């Protein structure tokens, strides 16, 4: 019995020593985990500061979720281990060592540094153009997208094909894109919103090809990060020309589409409807009643034209159309309004009177006010109305003396001699106190203007379209921050 007691004490001391060593080792492990976590926090903070604001927020949230998940896992394991110790406490002998809980190592998720590229399988190319071009409805899904998103997505797909040096994939994607845009415009070319949407996106795609081409003339507009995203293997200058030609075709189609919508409104709104009530007074006598150019005279008013112009402008802005391109569109529309109005004035004797001249001038002033309200006074649209403005002034000025003839010749520089003479011949007094323009006065005008170098054409060419240009308009949007909405059904694309 005496010999057994020291041996028992020695065993107890060894057990306590092992327990102590285990606790020390556990504390060292926890200290090491704290140091590693501190280092990870500092690294993440440094990385996050280099990210754009949107990516920085996303990274912080993802890290916080990971941290909380791991903490909950530690707590859960500790509770289970404690409970297991309690359950076994009655069965453990004094000399047995209890296992220490194992602390799980915190393994943070590595945040991805997206390069602004989208990867897709070759067999998914047709699905890409189908979902993004052929079946995309501007009036439905597209109105909730960031302006130009289809163009950005297509370019990000192109960038990845360039990145992996796959020339065939680059070629087929560009060809499929161009053909699909042509196809949808052939199918829905009379729908203004569709044509406007694809004009804006075609131009944005063209700008992306320039902005990320690697050409110094375009790179100087980029951030350093954007310059890192330039194409690295292929020169797509020839494709840029093809897409520019496509944009010209779409622009001409857009103008035609808008003209078809505006055409029925112009004569009624600019000539027939009395915007200033009562200014016309007594109708010119001796004229047969004329059937209106539309079913019900007065259906359209000047307000109808202004509302339609505003709808055009609002839609183009929503689609992300370049501001300089919007200016060119508006200039073209104002030319059409002015040309159609003047041509009808030159063909209608019932419209050539002093009161109608006042009415036209007022309508033109309202169009100018619309330009001012939209910040478009410097787009050249007002100048396209000058022939109509001068025709309205010609209806209002005196037409008797040589001095009047001199004033008319000086004032009507935007009208041809044929147009001036036609208005004077058609001029009709509204009452018996006003005289018709004498034949001798008209001959005086013709004599004074005979040396003018001009076209003998009487009517303006309403189908004339000004040449369109697409000034380079780089985007400040960072490609790596672009998110693809689920509504586009492009889940087969992978962000790289």
Image (cartoon, rainbow, N blue to C red):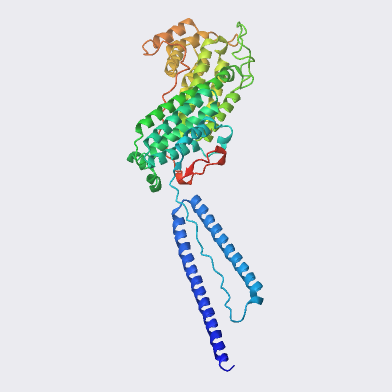
- Residue 14 image point, x, y percent: 52, 83
Dividing the image into 4 quarters, which one contains the N terminus?
bottom right
Tell me: 254 left or right of 92. left
- Residue 295 image point, x, y percent: 63, 14
Q: Is residue 393 above or below residue 431?
A: below
Asked whether the viewer can see residue 472, the reply is no
Residue at left offset 55%, top offset 10%: 348
In which image quadrant can residue 11 be found? Answer: bottom right
Q: Nearer the viewer, residue 225 or 326?
A: 225
Q: Nearer the viewer, residue 319 or 113?
A: 113
Q: Nearer the viewer, residue 239 or 104?
A: 104
Q: Total number of numbered labels? A: 0
Q: Is residue 11 above or below residue 355?
A: below
Q: Nearer the viewer, residue 363 or 475?
A: 475
Q: Is residue 281 above or below residue 91?
A: above
Q: Residue furthest bottom?
A: 2
- Residue 76 image point, x, y percent: 61, 65
């Amino acid at each position: 019995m005496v010999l057994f007691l020291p041996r028992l004490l020695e065993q107890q001391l060894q057990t306590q020593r092992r327990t102590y060593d285990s606790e020390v080792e556990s504390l060292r492990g926890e200290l090491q985990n704290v140091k590693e976590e501190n280092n990870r926090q500092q690294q993440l903070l440094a990385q996050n500061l280099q990210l754009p604001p949107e990516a920085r927020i996303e990274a912080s949230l993802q890290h916080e979720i990971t941290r909380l998940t791991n903490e909950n896992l530690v707590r859960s394991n500790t509770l289970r281990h404690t409970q297991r110790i309690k359950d076994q406490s009655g069965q453990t002998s004094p000399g047995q060592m209890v296992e220490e809980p194992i602390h799980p190592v915190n393994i943070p998720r590595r945040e991805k540094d997206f390069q602004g590229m989208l990867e897709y399988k070759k067999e998914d190319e047709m699905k890409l153009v189908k979902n993004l071009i052929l079946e995309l409805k501007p009036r439905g899904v597209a109105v909730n997208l960031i302006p130009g998103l289809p163009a950005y997505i297509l370019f990000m797909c192109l960038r990845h094909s360039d990145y992996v040096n796959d020339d065939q994939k680059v070629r087929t994607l560009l060809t499929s894109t161009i053909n699909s845009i042509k196809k949808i415009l052939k199918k829905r070319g009379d729908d203004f919103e569709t044509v406007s949407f694809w004009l804006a996106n075609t131009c944005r795609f063209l700008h992306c090809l320039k902005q990320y081409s690697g050409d110094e003339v375009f790179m100087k507009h980029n951030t350093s990060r954007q310059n890192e995203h330039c194409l690295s293997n292929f020169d797509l200058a020839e494709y840029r020309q093809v897409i520019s030609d496509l944009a010209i075709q779409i622009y001409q189609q857009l103008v035609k589409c808008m003209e078809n919508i505006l055409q029925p409104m112009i004569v009624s709104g600019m000539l027939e409807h009395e915007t200033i009530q009562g200014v016309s007074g007594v109708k010119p006598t001796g004229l047969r009643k004329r059937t209106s150019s539309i079913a019900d005279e007065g259906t359209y008013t000047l307000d109808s034209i202004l509302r339609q112009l505003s709808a055009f402008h609002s839609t183009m802005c929503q689609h992300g159309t370049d501001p300089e391109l919007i200016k060119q569109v508006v200039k073209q529309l104002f030319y059409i309004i002015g040309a159609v109005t003047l041509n009808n004035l030159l063909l209608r004797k019932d419209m050539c009177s002093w009161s109608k001249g006042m009415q036209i001038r007022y309508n033109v002033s309202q169009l100018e006010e619309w330009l001012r309200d939209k910040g478009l006074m410097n787009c050249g649209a007002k100048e396209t109305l000058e022939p109509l403005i001068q025709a309205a002034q010609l209806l209002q000025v005196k037409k008797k003396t040589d001095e009047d003839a001199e004033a008319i010749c000086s004032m009507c520089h935007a009208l041809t001699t044929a147009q001036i003479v036609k208005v004077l011949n058609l001029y009709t007094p509204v009452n018996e106190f006003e005289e018709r323009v004498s034949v001798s006065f008209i001959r005086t005008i013709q004599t004074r203007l005979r040396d003018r170098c001009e076209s003998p054409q009487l009517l303006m060419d309403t189908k004339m379209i000004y040449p369109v240009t697409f000034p380079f308009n780089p985007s400040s949007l960072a490609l790596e921050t672009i998110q693809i909405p689920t509504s586009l059904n492009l889940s087969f694309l992978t962000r790289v």
